[in-house]
Each structure stands twice: as C-alpha cells, then as structure tokens.
Amino acid sequence: MISLLSVLACRSTTTTPDTDGVTPKVTHTGTPDTTHSGLPWTFAHSGHTGATGHTGDAGPDCDTLPAGPYEMHSTNVIRTEEDFDFDDDRYLLTQSGVSLAGVTRTGQTSILVSNIGVDAAGIRTLPSGDILIAQPDTGVVRRVDASTGGSVAILSSLLFPNGLEVSSDGRGFVSEFVATGRVREFNPITGNNRIILEIPYPNNMVLSPDEQVLYVLASTGQFGGTSRVMALDRVVDGWASQPREILSSPQFLGGIAVDVCGNLYVTEYSSGRVGRILMPEQRVEAIADLGLLGGFGYYSSARFSPGYGGWSATELYVTDRFELFTIDLGIEGRHVLK
C-alpha cells in the first residue's frame, strides 16, 4: 500500500461499444445522437496498436518525462469556484454566483449561462461542446446546450452528485459523494444510467488516456478524513465488479488529473501539495507545494487544458475554490476536446 503523505511532506515545492443505451453517438457536426451507440475513439484502445494517447504523431516520450523543479504560478486575476473545465474556443468554465462563467486567459469574464444553481460542484465539457453540471444541493446533473445556453436535468434524485468525468465517445460519469456512495455511468442525452461502483464517499474522477480505467478518489468523510485512489477497470461487458487500490493517503485529497502518458496527479485538499503517481509502477513523487503561493486551502480540482485560447496544454491547473494556480509540467494532459 502506497502512502502519499510521506512523499509530499519531504519537499515543499513531480473497447467495445456499449449497447445498453448508456453510450450516446456524436455526429461529425458535434451534435449528439441517441439512435446508435459508439464513436470513433480519440485515444488508443483495444482496437488500436498505437501507444496510449497516440493521435497520429510520435507522441510524448513517456519514458523520459520533463524533469523538475516545475514552475508554479498564481494567475492572480482568474477566479474559480469548486470545479472548472475548458471549452474548445477560449474559455475556462467555472461557476460565478448562480451562473456559468467563461474566463479568458487574461482574466476577462463573461456570463455564458444563467441560473445553473447555487452549487455547481462538478463541471465537465462533453465532446459535442455541451457542458455537464452536477448540483449536490438539488441532486441533479444538468446538460447545458452550448449553442443556446439552455439546460435540462439529465439525472435527478441523486445523493450529493459531486464529481464528473466524460469519455471521448460521449458518456458521462457522476459520483454520489455520501457514505453509501455510488458512481454512475450515464447517457447525457437520454439520462439512461447504471451503477458501476459502490464505495464510501467517491468524489473526483478521471479516465486513463486509453479510457480503459476509471480512477476515483474515495474518502472516509466529506471534506475530511483519509483518502484512496481507486482504479476501476473496463472489462468486456462493462466494468470490473471491484476496484483496485492505487494509493492511500492520511490526508484528504481534492483534485485528480492524468497526463497523456497515464500518470496521475493528486492535490492535498488543505495544504495545496501536489503529487504525481507514476504509472504503471505506482511510484509517487512530490512536484509542487501551492501553499507557498499564498492560497488559503480547499484545493478541490485539478485539470489539464485542451490547449485553446492561450490556455497551455502542458500546464496543470489547480483551484483552491477562489484562485487558479498553474504548474508547468512540460507534458500534455488528457482532455476529450483534444
């Protein structure tokens, strides 16, 4: 069992398409279509022979990652809330009051969608450009139409929906962040869904670059206690019945992200320390301490950008529910809009 605390404390600054109705099709125009299941895959999977993350070029040298120390910065003028994502134009997407805001790399903010709720705890962009929003206070997951700004409730009666993830073929994943926690895979168009994992307090999630593993942060309490990184493997008929433990931490972990080589990045919620889990050997190394930049805690989300609008694709972005921080890792991350 790997523990994160001893590593981070030592330095202060490293398929088969489903046919069950869950998987939507996305047409070449980006318009979701519920008449068929499956998509061409953006990332390598069991039908390809290329390396993970292959997109037609040589790809990164995953055996020799850029060495630290890594530059970290506060963006100062860019304000974020609990979660954020990016679109395929120029915006970072985050909550602003009861609205969804788009923020440019220079800090200019525009209200894109009104009345998304008082608690947009999860935000993810779909391959179509539409946006999913998880609302713990109402138990709802909404899909925002990027072209009209309108929204519709896709899932309801959930128990504290909090973490979101999406796949390159348009599926959504949502965690119910309670003691009797569940992770659901769902169709963002029809709302058809299935429970793929039951585990206490599942929170943020990220898919591996080949989308054959779903990594889930699970804790012993809401916003406190110890945490584990769990791996749920894809199998022929869906998902494995039990997850694997990748890492344990005596600290509560907030954000999780993955680079194109499959390495994981996690943030300690209170301290702002960031660790990298080198995969597949599961070796942990410390890469940054964002607390040194003056953040006040609650490092709740970490994301890579697809690289549009001046948002670098090789920087890891982390929020403390107010300020946005960057860590220049020199390697790109997984994002469905790439």
Image (cartoon, helix red, strand yellow):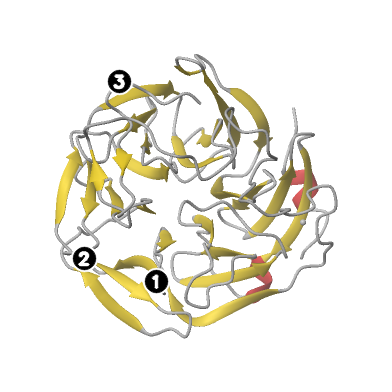
Identify which residue, 285 or 3, lies in the foreground: 285
Callout 1 amino acid: Asp
Residue 36 position, x and y percent, is 27, 31
Label 1 residue SS: loop
Q: Residue at x 85, y 53 (%)?
A: 64
Marked residue nearer the N-terminal end (3 or 1): 3
Is the residue 51 above or below the residue 299 in the image? Answer: above
Q: Residue at x 34, y 73 (%)?
A: 102
Q: Which mark is residue 20?
A: 3
Q: Which mark is residue 98?
A: 2
Q: Mark 3 Cα within 10 Å, few/some/many (few <14, many 20+)?
A: few
Callout 3 amino acid: Asp
Q: CA distance from mark 2 to mark 1?
A: 22 Å
Q: Mark 2 Cα within 10 Å, few/some/many (few <14, many 20+)?
A: some
Q: Residue at x 30, y 55 (%)?
A: 29
Identify which residue, 128 or 276, lies in the foreground: 128
Callout 2 amino acid: Val
Q: Which mark is residue 89?
A: 1
Residue 273 position by quadrant: bottom right
Label 3 residue SS: loop
Marked residue nearer the N-terminal end (2 or 1): 1
